[in-house]
């Protein structure tokens, strides 16, 4: 008989205990950590390999190499020909892909659970034995340039974010776009990719995350079998490259073909460095939820619906990152309203929090969403694996997730007001505006030409 | 290592069993005439509900393009005496999420809620209010119409949106699937248009409910009755006209973007057509199978012409499109178009190789469990089966329907559904 209510209480109360057992973790002698979360709802499994090397580890002149290498990882080893990786995953009834971020590069396969071993064999092979063929590189770098055109050059809002980030940060490598500057891509060589691979692709710079209908001991044995033979290597020294203090507001404008103007503001804020000792990042997360966490949140309520100042307005902040934090506010003004008016409107919302704080029911609402979101996440093995992987990439143990939720739930209205006062200051702010340019008048559409 | 092999055998046996059996779906009708499909699943304290109405853009009258989408977006912005903020605040308090959208055939309203009664019951009550007594307040209508116009104007600067519109217009002409909203058509809409569209289309007879999750059958039955009790009654949806097939042709539209956007296709496939299986198997090899398709190999891997290249069939109530698409830097647009056309022509001529056929089946059948491994994915599948009236054992027979496809079946199906004399091409941007 379904008795959902008592079970949920059990779920929430028992979670700290469960967390000790599931996920399970083991470290191989070569330093590779293997984290397994058992979830038997369906006979599938997601297998991910995360490398602690992202665009923030790149050097000038070679920006984008982390992502280029991600592409090259599908181009073959001595035992697995070019494209063979994808063919094997497909034949196993799987889906696979990879993603590069500022903090990490990660590879994943979702497969029926009986094929996990084969996935591990394939990943272990390319962890050390990548070909990096010059001819393959020559083709693939062109694909990456197309990707940059698609995702950045022709996307006014992406260009705006890219420029904003490069101005807000002047020293820290977070300033560089993950996909790299076009000129760096044009001048990149296979040996740049090789150097990157040799520097960072080692078991002691990686961890494996497995979520699915598996037995953790069996997974640990498979991991030992496939990854165990790889040797640890010494890794390059990582310099902190801390951003020097900003000393005044920064402003920039991007002109691009578009219709809607955009205002994007970024304040320098902290991220989580000590799960237990930190307070501010949790308060900033709750502030972000109060401002823009749902349809009834302040930006939507005030700026879009009541004042009709914006066609959309939102806030975004991520407290989990290896590098420095930025708290973004952005939106597009309604027709007849200016970018300046929207910026003033966004600032007025911040001032209101600074002066009057947030209401108890606003905070309670944000927390209710948080708890529900934790339960909804259990519906996706992929989301569970991502959560583990992302925390670990920022140097936070996945075992702290539960504690982070508790810390978020403990945030007070006073703490939210305090962070608003502390960080939303002119000298921490960069403002970027998209100044939309009309498209050249379209040449008369070619009449429909009939093909024979 | 013996325990290992044993384990693998067990895994295999289980997986084979799963691959043959989809979820247990129950179907019934509410007293008001709405169709309900239900999958009971207590593994998580979550309930997902999707309500689909035959109220997509194809139901818009000529000259009223945009009314379907505007009606759907206004649905949860004021209902049963509550204004939009009261609804949104209450849903947020409950941790419940409303979503949905509109396509050519369907307007969808989706609710995800926790299943404890103190969360579930008020969330479902809110959904009922939205379905049965939306208010369409005049000031909210004005604002949402203005926002809709703003986003349309923005979209019309984007090469992908321009290409997509021109493509559908070229394929379908004056057929309802070929219509699209413009800033002018939305600007001309009135609140009365929305009220009329709602009254005529959001009726019990046109509703199909999918419910997945932590409810008993009796509870689901009560929920379905409750949700649909207040729906207006009206005639069922008329059939959508059969589209006329376009003549092959090519249209070029100038745009300053760094990349040109290419689309090729034609009206091709209805939901429920048995050719869906050979076409799915064939398209996997042509351009559907992610990184292993012919288009990916020829356009991306061998020539570096594009980051993304795809082909797919989108079966709809009436003939939905077959579409082949890619983006490439503008100087190489003609090269890319030529390669894409050659790959397609070659495939139409010869079909897949036996090896390709085997690989396609292996993946489509092998990956079947991945299509059903969350409540969210179950909901999508079940809602589709319910709305389009597919057999309840559709998922159970999916693997065997894929397995029995032959190379000859693929060739024959493609020759019936993808005829070059009807293939339209749209290119936005380029030199």
Image (cartoon, grey):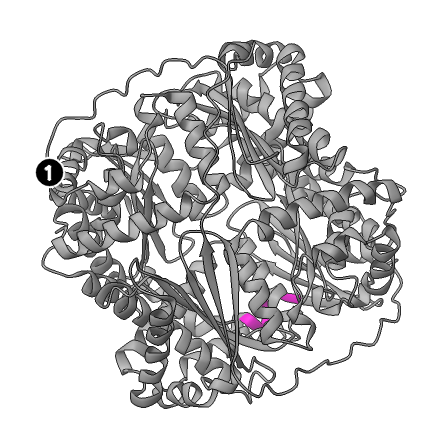
Q: Is residue A22 magenta?
A: yes
Position of A136 with respect to A430 (left or right) is right
Position of B138 with respect to B186 (left or right) is left
Quadrant housing residue B410: top right
Is residue A105 positioned above or below B411 on the image? Answer: below
Q: Local crowd at mark 1 within 10 Å, few (<14), some, or many (≥20)?
A: some
Is residue A176 positioned above or below A73 on the image? Answer: below
Q: Residue at x 42, y 48 (%)?
A: B375
- The answer to whether one can see residue A272 in this image is yes
Q: Residue at x 67, y 21 (%)?
A: B343
Say which of B387 and A262 sits in front.
A262
The quadrant of the picture occupied by the C terminus of chain A is top right
In the picture of the structure, the residue carrying the numbered disc 1 is B232
Q: Is residue A404 magenta?
A: no
- The answer to whether one can see residue B215 in this image is no
How many numbered marks are there? 1
Q: Residue at x 47, y 48 (%)?
A: B374
Question: Residues in magenta?
Answer: A19-24
Q: Residue at x 82, y 45 (%)?
A: A137
**Pointer 1 indicates a residue of which chain?**
B
Position of B137 with respect to A380 (left or right) is left
Say which of A28 and A374 sits in front.
A374
Task: Give the percent coordinates (x, y) of residue B10.
Answer: 65, 41
């Amino acid at each position: 008989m379904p008795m959902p209510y008592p079970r949920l209480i059990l779920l929430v109360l028992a979670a700290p205990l469960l967390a000790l057992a599931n996920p399970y973790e083991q470290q191989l002698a070569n330093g590779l950590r293997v984290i397994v979360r058992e979830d038997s709802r369906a006979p599938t499994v997601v297998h991910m390999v995360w490398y602690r090397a992202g665009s923030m580890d790149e050097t000038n002149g070679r920006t984008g190499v982390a992502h280029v290498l991600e592409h090259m990882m599908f181009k073959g080893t001595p035992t697995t020909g070019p494209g063979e990786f994808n063919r094997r995953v497909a034949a196993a009834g799987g889906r696979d892909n990879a993603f590069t971020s500022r903090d990490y590069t990660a590879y994943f396969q979702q497969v029926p659970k009986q094929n996990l071993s084969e996935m591990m064999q394939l990943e272990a092979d390319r962890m050390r034995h990548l070909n990096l063929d010059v001819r393959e590189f020559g083709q693939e770098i062109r694909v990456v340039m197309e990707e940059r055109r698609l995702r950045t050059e022709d996307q006014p809002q992406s260009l705006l974010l890219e420029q904003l980030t490069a101005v807000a940060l002047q020293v820290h490598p977070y300033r560089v776009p993950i996909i790299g500057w076009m000129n760096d891509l044009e001048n990149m060589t296979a040996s740049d990719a090789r150097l990157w691979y040799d520097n960072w692709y080692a078991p002691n710079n990686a961890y494996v995350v497995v979520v699915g209908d598996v037995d953790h001991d069996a997974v640990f044995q498979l991991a030992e079998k496939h990854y165990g033979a790889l040797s640890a290597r010494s890794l390059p020294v990582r310099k902190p490259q801390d951003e020097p203090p900003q000393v005044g507001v920064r402003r920039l404008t991007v002109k691009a073909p578009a219709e809607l103007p955009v205002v994007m503001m970024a304040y320098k804020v902290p991220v989580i460095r000590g799960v237990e000792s930190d307070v501010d990042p949790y308060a900033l997360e709750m502030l972000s939820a109060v401002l823009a966490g749902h349809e009834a949140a302040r930006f939507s309520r005030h700026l879009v619906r009541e004042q009709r100042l914006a066609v959309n307005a939102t806030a975004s902040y991520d407290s989990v990152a290896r590098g420095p934090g930025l708290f973004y506010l952005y939106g597009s003004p309604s027709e007849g309203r200016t970018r300046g008016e929207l910026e003033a409107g966004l600032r007025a919302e911040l001032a209101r929090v600074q002066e009057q704080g947030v209401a108890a029911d606003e905070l309670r609402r944000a927390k209710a969403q948080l708890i529900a979101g934790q339960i909804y996440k259990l519906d996706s093995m992929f989301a569970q694996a991502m959560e583990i992987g992302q925390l670990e990439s920022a140097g936070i143990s996945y075992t702290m997730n539960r504690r982070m939720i508790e810390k978020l739930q403990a945030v007070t209205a006073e703490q939210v007001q305090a962070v608003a006062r502390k960080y939303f200051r002119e000298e921490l702010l960069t403002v970027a505006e998209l100044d939309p340019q009309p498209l050249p008048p379209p040449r008369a559409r070619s009449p429909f030409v009939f093909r024979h | 290592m013996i325990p290992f092999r044993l384990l693998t055998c067990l895994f295999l046996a289980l997986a084979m069993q799963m691959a043959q059996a989809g979820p247990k779906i129950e179907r019934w009708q509410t007293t008001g005439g709405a169709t309900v499909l239900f999958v009971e699943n207590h593994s998580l304290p979550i309930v997902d509900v999707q309500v689909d109405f035959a109220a997509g853009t194809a139901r818009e009258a000529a000259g009223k393009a945009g009314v379907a989408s505007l009606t759907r977006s206004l649905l949860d912005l004021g209902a049963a005496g509550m204004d939009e903020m009261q609804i949104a605040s209450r849903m947020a308090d409950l941790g419940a999420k409303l979503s949905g959208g509109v396509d050519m055939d369907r307007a969808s309203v989706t609710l995800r809620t926790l299943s404890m009664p103190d969360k579930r019951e008020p969330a479902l009550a809110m959904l009922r209010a939205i379905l049965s007594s939306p208010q369409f307040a005049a000031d909210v209508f004005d604002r949402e119409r203005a926002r809709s116009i703003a986003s349309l104007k923005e979209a019309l600067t984007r090469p992908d949106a321009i290409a997509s519109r021109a493509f559908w217009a070229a394929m379908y002409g004056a057929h309802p699937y070929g219509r699209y909203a413009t800033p002018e058509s939305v600007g001309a809409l009135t609140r009365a248009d929305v009220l009329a569209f709602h009254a005529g289309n959001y009726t019990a007879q046109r509703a199909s409910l999918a419910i997945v999750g932590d409810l008993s059958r009796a509870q689901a039955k009560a929920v379905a009755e409750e949700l649909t009790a207040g729906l207006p009654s009206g005639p069922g949806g008329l059939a959508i006209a059969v589209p006329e097939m376009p003549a092959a042709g090519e249209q070029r539209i100038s745009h300053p973007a760094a990349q040109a956007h290419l689309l090729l296709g034609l009206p091709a496939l209805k939901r429920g057509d048995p050719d869906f299986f050979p076409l799915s198997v064939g398209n996997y090899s042509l351009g559907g199978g992610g990184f292993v398709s012919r288009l990916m190999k020829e356009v991306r891997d061998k020539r570096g012409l594009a980051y993304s290249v795809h082909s797919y069939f989108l079966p709809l109530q009436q003939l939905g499109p077959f579409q082949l698409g890619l983006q490439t830097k503008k100087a190489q647009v003609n090269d890319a178009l030529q390669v894409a056309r050659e790959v397609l022509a070659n495939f139409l001529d010869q079909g897949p190789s036996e090896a390709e056929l085997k690989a396609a089946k292996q993946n489509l059948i092998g990956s079947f469990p991945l299509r059903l491994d969350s409540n969210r994915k179950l909901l999508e599948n079940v809602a589709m089966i319910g709305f389009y009236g597919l057999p309840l054992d559709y998922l159970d027979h999916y693997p065997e329907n894929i397995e029995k496809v032959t190379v000859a079946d693929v060739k024959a199906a493609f020759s019936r559904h993808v005829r070059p004399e009807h293939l339209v091409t749209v290119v936005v941007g380029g030199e």
